[in-house]
Image (spheres, coloured by chain):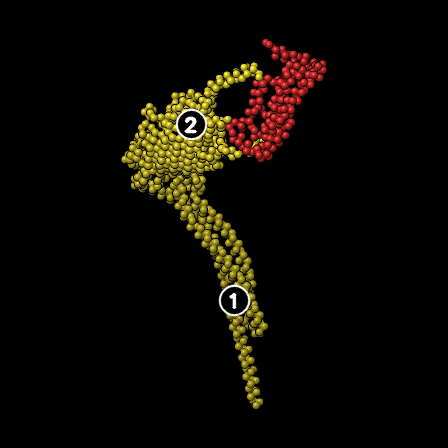
Chain colours: A red, B yellow
């Protein structure tokens, strides 16, 4: 039910309302959330940024969900990437050692292969995802939006009882 | 900027954090109490705990820890306690305290409420503790204590059970010797049977010797045949004689060995008497057994109490823990890569606890006011590199003083604990003395001076203590029942102090206890002069019974041994005689043959000589 509503809202967002930058920012930040382990210092900071910045939250949740699945698939790759930076790149050992002995840095779990690998990956992917999503939203609004609304599946989802019931509950008192 | 989030989420979150901060003190207080109760096994109460953020510190005004063995008393209670946590290490989830201040530490205070809590059943460690080992050793010691009531000893003497074969090693040894004689006899019979078989060969040789008729020896051929016959007979008899000598030697050696083995019976008989005397609990007035009898029960009971604390320390101070094994991570967990650390910290570490005892001792004159320091309390000494050390001094308003220096080393696989304790001018209260059936009494108004040391490396244990009883008076519970009690009372009545030396150790395996006092010599001399005769009679009676039992068994053995020995020797002698007789006969025959040979030689020589003379005479006549 929640996810049906999410898809509906996302399609509506693509169509109108918030700016493409807000949607793309939410999606890119959500991608970072989904790719990285949750219980880390940078993870908490990321959520704080998400809630403080006026990015699209639906895009964040949808993106986090999608990229959590991506992270599961690419976990061995993140592990290998993290291991490469932590172990194989000798020149970085000094940095890691000083961070390891610093008081707060260990809370980032930087010395964990998956945590570091996924963080670097999400950091690198942030800009392409942001730019790609922004272009996609603009293109959607110009070329695809009107035809999607005519899709039967969209109408079925929009008019389904759970979504309508969810809308009523959500709009109570507003 | 999402202003609604800031107003409706962040601001309330900050407000909630503030509220939490005010309640946090209560939560920490109850957490510390629960953790303390889990460790001690009795109620731990903290009052007015407060937190400060810069530096992060905890402070409380009062702490009392109930004694699990006496829940209406505290192990100790304190005044204000304050400690600051290392913030940097706290972020890493480690509780590092540089210095903890403990003020007004008082030991053994009374409680107004019951401090007991329901305890979970103790975990089976699979190893027997020093406390359990000591308890069984003390029970053994109590059972060994001699009885001084001679009438009771005489009444309870049960010779049937005392002289059980299991208790008498000499009887067991004699039975072993009997079995050895039986086995040897079987071998002797086999040897004698072999010799019997060779008698036929002797008979054949005898026949051959008899067949040599000297009167028939007229030709050289017959003489040569007779000589060969005699030589063959001689060789045969000589072989048989060698075999006989060898076997006789072996048999005689075995008999001598068996006979020599009987000498050990006397030594074992003496030891058997000692065993039976101990089982009958006969007192040995010449040795130092009285200390055990009079003071042992009480002192060993006290020792056991202290041992239980040593056991407690051994069990509860965290042990050395090596690094965990490498585990392959599952998905999303990754692998933690370790980097060199400038300083590795354990999970928690209180570097120094400064304890200051209260000054106003007149306020509670019965309590102990302690001061000193405890260093390096931690869950992992291998990381801190220091053992836990305790240096405390305590005193009472009456002048009693105590000191304890202890170290608990868990830096390696094998834990090592050391204790050094002194006490002076300690009121002993009423100390139980004697036993229910021997001088039941108590020492009253005594003061004690104690110096004790204990080392507990791994599973071994070695402790010694010297206890000085001073300014004492004896209070006897009843009139003396026998002479020994009367003597003991008269000796005790005249003394005002004595020293006790105690040692417990298990360095050679089982736990041993040695307890001596300087009372022993005085009591033993007086007791011996009065009770010596009666005791000697009982001892002689026991000795006679033991000796009689052994003598009966010994006679059985000697009868068997002599019978088998004589039988074997007689048969050997008979065989030897037969052999000798034949050898003698052969010698005679050989001499006769030799004489006959000589006679024949002379005859032949004479004949040749005559022929030569005749030939010479004929030659001269011709000329």
Q: Quadrant of residue B222?
A: bottom right
Report whether mark 1 lies on the same chain as mark 2.
yes
For disc 1, the chain is B
Residue that label 2 marks: B100
Label 2: few (<14), some (14–19) or many (≥20) C-alpha neighbours in 10 Å = many
Give whichever of B445, B98 is nearer the camera.
Answer: B98
Residue at the image position 42 percent from the left and 21 percent from the top: B47
In the picture, the quarter occupied by the N terminus of chain B is: top right
Measured as percent of width and height from the top left, residue B119 is found at 46, 25
Measured as percent of width and height from the top left, residue B429 is found at 33, 29
Residue A161 as seen in the image, left or right of residue B236: right
Label whose residue precedes the other's in the sequence (1 or 2): 2
Residue that label 1 marks: B586
Spatial distance from mark 1 to mark 2, Cα to Cα?
112 Å
SS state under label 1:
helix
Residue at the image position 59 percent from the left and 32 percent from the top: A85
Measured as percent of width and height from the top left, residue B2 is found at 57, 16
Give whichever of B437, B475 is nearer the camera.
Answer: B475
Instruction: Judge whether B498 appears above or below B263 on screen.
Output: above
SS state under label 2:
strand
Q: Is residue B74 visible?
A: no
Residue at the image position 47 percent from the left and 55 percent from the top: B253
Residue at the image position 56 percent from the left and 29 percent from the top: A110
């Amino acid at each position: 039910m929640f996810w049906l509503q999410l898809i509906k809202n996302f399609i509506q967002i693509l169509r109108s309302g918030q700016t493409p930058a807000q949607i793309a920012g939410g999606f890119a930040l959500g991608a970072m959330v989904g790719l990285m382990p949750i219980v880390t210092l940078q993870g908490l900071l990321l959520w704080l940024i998400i809630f403080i910045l006026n990015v699209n939250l639906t895009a964040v949740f949808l993106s986090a969900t999608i990229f959590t699945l991506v992270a599961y698939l690419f976990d061995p790759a993140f592990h290998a990437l993290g291991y490469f930076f932590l172990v194989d790149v000798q020149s970085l050992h000094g940095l890691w050692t000083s961070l390891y002995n610093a008081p707060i840095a260990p809370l980032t779990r930087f010395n964990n292969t998956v945590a570091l690998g996924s963080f670097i990956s999400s950091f690198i992917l942030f800009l392409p995802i942001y730019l790609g999503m922004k272009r996609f939203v603009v293109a959607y609004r110009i070329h695809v939006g009107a035809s999607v609304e005519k899709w039967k599946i969209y109408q079925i989802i929009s008019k389904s009882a759970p979504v309508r019931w969810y809308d009523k509950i959500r709009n109570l008192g507003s | 900027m999402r202003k609604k989030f800031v107003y409706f989420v962040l601001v309330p979150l900050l407000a909630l954090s503030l509220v939490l901060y005010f309640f946090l003190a209560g939560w920490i207080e109850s957490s510390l109490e629960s953790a303390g109760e889990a460790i001690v096994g009795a109620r731990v109460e903290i009052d007015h705990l407060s937190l400060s953020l810069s530096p992060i510190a905890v402070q409380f005004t009062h702490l009392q820890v109930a004694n699990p063995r006496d829940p209406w008393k505290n192990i100790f209670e304190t005044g204000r306690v304050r400690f600051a946590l290392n913030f940097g290490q706290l972020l890493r989830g480690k509780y590092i305290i540089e210095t903890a201040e403990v003020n007004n530490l008082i030991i053994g205070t009374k409680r107004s409420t019951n401090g007991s809590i329901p305890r979970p059943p103790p975990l089976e460690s699979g190893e027997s503790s020093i406390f359990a080992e000591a308890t069984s050793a003390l029970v053994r010691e109590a059972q060994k204590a001699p009885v001084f009531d001679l009438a009771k000893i005489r009444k309870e003497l049960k010779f049937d059970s005392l002289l059980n074969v299991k208790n008498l090693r000499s009887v067991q040894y004699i039975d072993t010797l009997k079995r050895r004689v039986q086995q040897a006899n079987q071998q002797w019979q086999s040897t004698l049977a072999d010799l019997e078989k060779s008698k036929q060969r002797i008979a054949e040789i005898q026949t051959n010797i008899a067949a040599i008729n000297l009167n028939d020896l007229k030709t050289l051929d017959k003489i040569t045949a007779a000589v060969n016959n005699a030589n063959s007979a001689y060789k045969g008899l000589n072989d048989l004689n060698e075999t006989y000598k060898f076997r006789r030697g072996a048999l005689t050696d075995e008999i001598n060995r068996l006979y020599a083995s009987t000498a050990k019976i006397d030594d074992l008989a003496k030891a058997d008497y000692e065993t039976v005397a101990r089982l009958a609990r006969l007192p040995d007035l010449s040795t130092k057994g009285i200390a055990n009898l009079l003071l042992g029960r009480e002192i060993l009971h006290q020792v056991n109490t202290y041992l239980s604390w040593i056991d407690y320390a051994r069990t509860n101070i965290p042990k050395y823990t090596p690094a965990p094994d490498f585990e392959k991570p599952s998905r999303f967990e990754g692998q933690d890569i370790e980097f060199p650390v400038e300083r590795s910290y354990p999970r928690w570490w209180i570097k120094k606890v400064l304890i200051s005892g209260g000054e106003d001792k007149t306020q509670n004159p019965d309590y102990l006011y302690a001061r000193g320091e405890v260093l390096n309390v931690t869950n992992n000494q291998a990381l801190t590199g220091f053992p836990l050390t305790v240096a405390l001094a305590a005193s009472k308003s009456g002048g009693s003083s105590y000191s304890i220096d202890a170290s608990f080393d868990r830096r390696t696989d094998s834990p090592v604990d050391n204790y050094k304790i002194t006490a002076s001018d300690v009121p002993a209260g009423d100390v139980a003395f004697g036993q229910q059936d021997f001088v039941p009494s108590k020492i009253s108004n005594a003061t004690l001076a104690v110096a004790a040391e204990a080392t507990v490396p791994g599973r071994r244990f070695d402790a010694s203590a010297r206890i000085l009883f001073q300014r004492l008076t004896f209070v006897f519970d009843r009139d003396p029942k026998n002479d020994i009690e009367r003597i003991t009372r008269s000796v005790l009545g005249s003394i005002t102090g004595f020293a006790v030396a105690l040692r417990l150790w298990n360095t050679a395996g089982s736990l041993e206890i040695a307890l001596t006092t300087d009372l022993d010599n005085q009591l033993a001399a007086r007791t011996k002069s009065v009770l010596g005769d009666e005791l000697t009679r009982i001892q002689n009676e026991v000795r006679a019974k033991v000796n009689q039992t052994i003598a009966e068994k010994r006679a059985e053995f000697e009868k068997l041994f002599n019978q088998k020995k004589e039988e074997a020797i007689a048969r050997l002698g008979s065989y030897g005689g037969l052999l000798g007789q034949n050898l003698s006969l052969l010698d005679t025959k050989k001499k006769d043959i030799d004489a006959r040979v000589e006679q024949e030689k002379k005859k032949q020589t004479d004949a040749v000589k005559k022929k030569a003379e005749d030939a010479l005479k004929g030659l001269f006549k011709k000329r």
